[in-house]
Amino acid sequence: MSDKHIERSADPASQKMIKKAEEENIKIAWDRYDAMQPQCGFGELGICCKICNMGPCRIDPFGEGSQTGICGASKDTIVARNLARMITGGAAAHSDHGRDIAHALILAAKGEAHDYALKGTDKLRRLAKVYGITVEGKSIEKIAEELGEACLAEFGQQHGELRMLSLAPQRRQELWRKLGVSPRGVDREIVEMMHRTHIGVDNDYKNIINHGLRVALGDGWGGSMIATELSDVLFGSPEPIRATVNLGVLKEDHVNIVVHGHEPTLSDVVTDAVKDKELIDLAKKYGAKGINLVGMCCTANEILMRHGLPSAGNFLQQELAILTGAVELMMVDVQCIMPALSSVANSFHTKLVTTSPKCIFPGVEHIQFHEEKALEIAKKIIRMGVENYKNRTKQRVNIPPEIKGLVAGFTTENTFRILGGKYRFTVRPLNDAIISGRLRGAAGVVGCNNPNIRHDWAHIEMVKELIKNDILVVQTGCSAIACAKEGLLTPESAFEYAGEGLREVCEAVGIPPVLHVGSCVDNSRILLILSSVVAEGGLGDDISDLPVAGAAPEWMSEKAVSIGFYFVASGVYTVFGTPQPVIGSENVTNYITNELENVIGGKFAFEADPIKAARMMIEHINKKRAALKLAGVMYEKTANAKA
Ligand code: BF8
C-alpha cells in the first residue's frame, strides 16, 4: 500500500479514511483529481472563452497562434470576463443564501413558520436602526417583518446604495462612491455583470474588474451580511462555546446523522428534532444508544457556533465521513456538496437526502424543505436515518478516533465584550494591544480545501506562522475547521504556538489565539470587526490603514473568489494559495496584484507556500505599522519574525 494517504492530507483521521477508500477501491476526490491530470492549461491560465457559439476560443499562451478570440476579444478581455463571472457566481451563491434567510425571517415574523423564534432581539433593534425602521410602539414581530422586507428589497434595488455600506468607515464609503463601486442592489450588480460579460459588450479589462469589485461588495456588505445578521436575529447571536471536531465525533453505538451544506434554516431545526423522545426511543429500539447529530462544512459551522454541536470535518472530508461506514443519513442543502456523494453513499448503507429544490441529485431521495413545516420535515428525515441503523454493516464500521476540542462562537459583538471586559463593549483593548506592539496585527485566514494542495496543511502552517509572530487570527469556513482539528482554536494553544505578546493578550482575555467567527457568509463579521477597529481610533481612518491581512490558502470555490474581491475592495491585502485563473493575462494579473492597491487600497498576492505567504502578510502588516508610526513590536526577537 502506498503512502498516498499521508501525502493527500495532513489530518490523521482523514489519512485513515483515504487509506480505507484505497483498500476498498472506492474513488474519492483525490483519485478523481489524479485522473484529471494534466489539467487544462488554457483553463488554468484563464484564456479559454466559451461565452458564445463562435467559440470555444483560446489564446495561444506562447504568443505564436491566435491572440484574440473570433470576435476579437483579447486575452485581457477573456481573462477578465472569466474572472468576473467567477466573482458573480460566488456572490450569487452567498446572496441567494441571504435571500432565503430574509424570507424565513419574514415567515417567522408573520407567524407562518411556527418552528422559529426571533431569538436575537438586540440585534434586531440595531439592524432596524441601520435600515431606518422606527421601532417605537411596534412589536418585535412587526419590526422583524419590516426588517426582512427591507433586506429582501435590497436584492432587487435599482438605485442608491445598500444600507449596510453605512457601517464601513466614512473614508471607505467615500472612496467607493468616488470610484462608482458602491453596490446599488445585490442582484442588480450580478445581472449587470452577466450583461457586461456577454459577447460584444465590455472589453476593457479594468472596467470589467472594477464592476467585479462592485458585485463582490454587494456580496460582502450585502448578501452575506444579510445572511449573517438576519441569522443572528432568527437563531440568536452566537456566544463563545466549547465543542469538538473531526471524524471522531461520529459514534459507533449511535445513529449518526450528518447535516452538510450551508443554510441554517433546516439544520437549526434539526438540532431540536433530534431531542424528540419518540425518535430517541425508536433509535434505542433498533439497538442504538441514541441519535448523534453532527455537521459538515459550513452547516457544521452554523450549528457549532450557535449550539456547540460537533463538526465532523471540512470540504474534503464529506466523502470520508461516509467511508467510516457509520453514517446512517447525510442531509444536504446547498453549496459545496460533491455530486460524488451519491456514489460513495451507494457503496455503504448511508442514505443521502437532498432538501433544496436548487440542489437535486439524480436518483437521490429528495424531501423538500418548507419553513412552514420545518420541524415536521426535520423529524421525517431523522426518522429515516434512525430506521436505516438496522442496515448498518457492523464489520465495515471504522471511525477514526481523532477528535479535538475547540472554542467557537466569536462575533463582532461578543469579541468586543470579551476584549472590553464585562461592562465595556469596546475593541479598545485590541487597538491598544496593536498600538503598543504587544500584537503585531490581525489576519483573517479563510476558505476551502482543494486536492491540489495537501488537505489542511496550508491552513495549519500559515496560521501557526502568523500566531508565532503575534498576529491574532480570525477564521471562518473550512479553514477554521482545519485549524480546529490541529487544536489551534483553544485558549491553551496560545502557550504552545503563540508569540509572547499574543500569548499575554490571550491569557489576559481568556481567548484562543485563533478565533472562529463562523461560516463563509460570516466573513461579513470580519468586515464589521475591521470597521469597529477603525472607529475605535488610533489606527488610521480606513480599513486600508490597519495592520491586517487576509488569506485563502487552499481556495477552490467561486465564493472564495468573491470573498477575496470584497476584502480587497474593502482595503485588505489578500493572499490566495494557488493563483486565480488570470496568469494568461499579464495585464489582469498586474492589475489585481499590483495596481489595484493604488485604486482601492487592497490587492491580491498568490503564493502556494503557506510559510512564504504568511511572511508576505507579516511584511505587509509591518509596512502598515510603519505607516501609522506605531511602536516596534514588543517581542520581535522572541517571535522570530525576521527569520
Ligand atoms: O462556504 S470554505 S469549501 S464549505 S466555499 Fe465550501 Fe470553501 Fe468550505 Fe462553506 Ni466556503
Image (cartoon, rainbow, N blue to C red):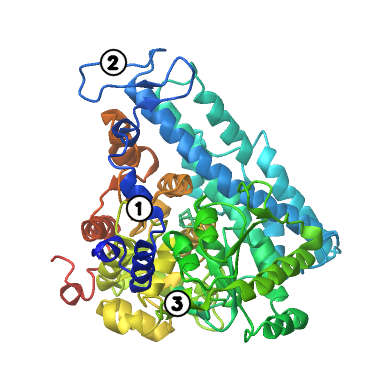
The answer for how far apart the CA atoms under marks 2 and 3 are is 54 Å
In the picture, the disc for residue 399 is: 3
Residue 438 in percent (x, y) is at 29, 75
- For numbered disc 1, what is the local secondary structure? helix
- Callout 1 amino acid: Asp
**Earlier along the polypeptide chain: callout 3 or callout 1?**
1
Q: Residues within 10 Å of mark 1 (few under 14, many from 20)?
A: some
**Earlier along the polypeptide chain: callout 1 or callout 2?**
1
**Earlier along the polypeptide chain: callout 2 or callout 3?**
2
Q: Residues within 10 Å of mark 2 (few under 14, many from 20)?
A: some
The answer for how far apart the CA atoms under marks 3 and 1 are is 21 Å
Question: Residue 432, can we see it?
Answer: yes
Which marked residue is nearer to the observer: mark 2 or mark 3? 3
- Callout 2 amino acid: Ser
Left or right of 208? Residue 443 is: left
Question: Residue 135, can we see it?
Answer: no
Which marked residue is nearer to the observer: mark 1 or mark 2? 1
Given residues 176 and 223, the one toward you in this image is 223
The answer for how far apart the CA atoms under marks 1 and 2 are is 34 Å
In the picture, the disc for residue 31 is: 1
